[in-house]
Each structure stands twice: as structure tokens, then as C-alpha cells.
Image (spheres, rainbow, N blue to C red):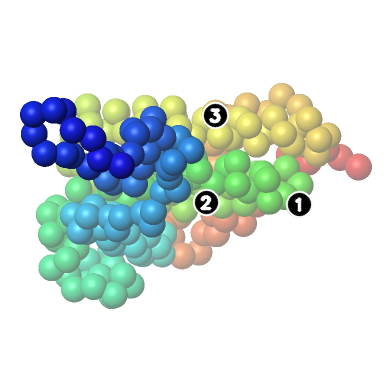
Amino acid sequence: MAETNGTGPATPEGPAASDGEATADGSATPDGQAAPAGPAAPDPPARARRRDAQRNQRSLLDAAAAVFVTSGVDAPVRDIAARAGVGIGTIYRHFPTRADLVVAVYRHQIDACAEAGPVLLAAGPTAHAALGRWVDLFADFLVTKHGLAAAMQGDAPGFEALHASFLERLLPVCADLLDAATAAGEIQAGVDAYQLMRGVGNLCAGAESDPRYDARRLVAVLVAGLAVPH
């Protein structure tokens, strides 16, 4: 109904305000509860482009790492580009120098090895088997590591910093795999992660330049020799 104030025309009587009244943007419902969220807004184009660039760079690093394993860190850039399915110019846009590329692959492989440890351990079938598969990945990484010093052209401080990063990330991963295999009674107790990694590194040194030398076979013998005798 309408009411007057005694001095002017009647004004329409409006509904009483409610604490739970819906707002203009639909953020509340009549019962005071938050309205269901609508469909998520698409990512801004800039964010999507960044994700694409990160994926593309990972693909380049994966390709470079695979080529390094078979041909060493001095492999032609055209071989890396061909494996990645891109032009040579794309490689140089991301990595202007050989040292830039080798360092990027080095960091990429450290991350891959660090992340692989828990995944392999969870996949089984045994902790000893997981350790063996992880050591295979580590051996691939060592090809890049052994070529790193030459690629960095005497940058001793930079090389030492990368080496320290390598130890910091991978020693705990190797130690966890060894501990799990020891706890399961699968390998002999007292095997030190640093000693194992150093031994694998020594077995792999120079392997990429000697086709008659099968470092992986000797690494497999080393890992098999950790087993508890039956």
C-alpha cells in the first residue's frame, strides 16, 4: 500500500531489506548463503602463452638431453632441432650459446632425477629395482655433467655452484632409495649414497667417446652386486 508524508505525493512502499538479499552480482542467495561459483574464467592469454613457452622449452631440453646421451654435449644443434621438431633458430632463441644449452639441460636433468626417485619407489616392484632404474637415469645425466666443465669454458665458480646444486638435490634422493632397499632386506646395509653416486660417475666417465666401452653394463653389475646374498 502507499503512504504519504503529509507534504508530498504518495510513494510506493518497497519490500523490507534483508541481510540475505541477493546482490547485483549474485554473490548471496536469499537465505544468506554464498551463491554457487560460476564457470571459471579462462586464463588470460598472457598466462596461456607462458605455459606454452614453458612446455616448449621442456620439450627442447628433453630432446637435447636425449641427443647428449647418444652423441655427447658437442652434438650438432641441427640434431637437437630435428629431434625436437623445431628449426635451429628456435634453439638459438632459447639458448644463444652452447654453454647456455648445456647448463639448462644439466638443471633440467637434475630436476628430472630428483622427481623420479619417489615415483620409481612407489611404482616398485621392489626398492632394489627402483634403485636400479634411478641409477639408469643418473647415468644419462652424467653424460651432460661430464661435458659441463668444457662447455662452461673455465667458469670455475659457476661450475662449482652447479655441482653443489647437483649434490644438494640428488644425494637425498639416492639415500632414500638405498634406505628403502636396506629396510626391505634387499641390499646390504651400510651403502653410502655419495660413494654409490661417485662410483657410478667413475664408471661412466668417458663412456660417450669410447664405443667399445659399455658403461651401463658395468653400472648394472654394480647395482646388482648390492643385493643381499641368498
- Disc 1 and disc 2: Cα gap in Å? 17 Å
Residue at x 20%, y 58% (from the top left corner): 45
- The x, y position of residue 58, in whole percent, is 33, 57
- Disc 1 and disc 3: Cα gap in Å? 21 Å
Confirm or deny contact between disc 1 and disc 2 (CB under 8 A): no
Residue at x 23%, y 35% (from the top left corner): 3
- Disc 3 and disc 2: Cα gap in Å? 15 Å
| Disc 3 packing (10 Å; few <14; some 14–19; many ≥20) | some
The residue labelled by disc 3 is 172
Who is closer to the viewer here, 218 or 33?
33
The residue labelled by disc 2 is 137
- The x, y position of residue 200, in whole percent, is 54, 42
Q: Which numbered tag is attached to residue 125?
A: 1
In the image, 176: left or right of 11? right
**Position of the N terminus by quadrant:** top left
Q: In the rendered view, tell whether residue 112 sits above or below residue 49.
A: above
Q: Amino acid at mark 3?
A: Pro
- Name the image quarter holding residue 182: top right
- The x, y position of residue 70, in whole percent, is 41, 64
**Position of the C terminus by quadrant:** top right
Farthest-out residue, front = 6
Who is closer to the viewer here, 216 or 97?
97
| Disc 1 packing (10 Å; few <14; some 14–19; many ≥20) | few
> In terms of secondary structure, where does tag 3 sit?
helix
In the image, 1: left or right of 217? left
Who is closer to the viewer here, 184 or 72?
184
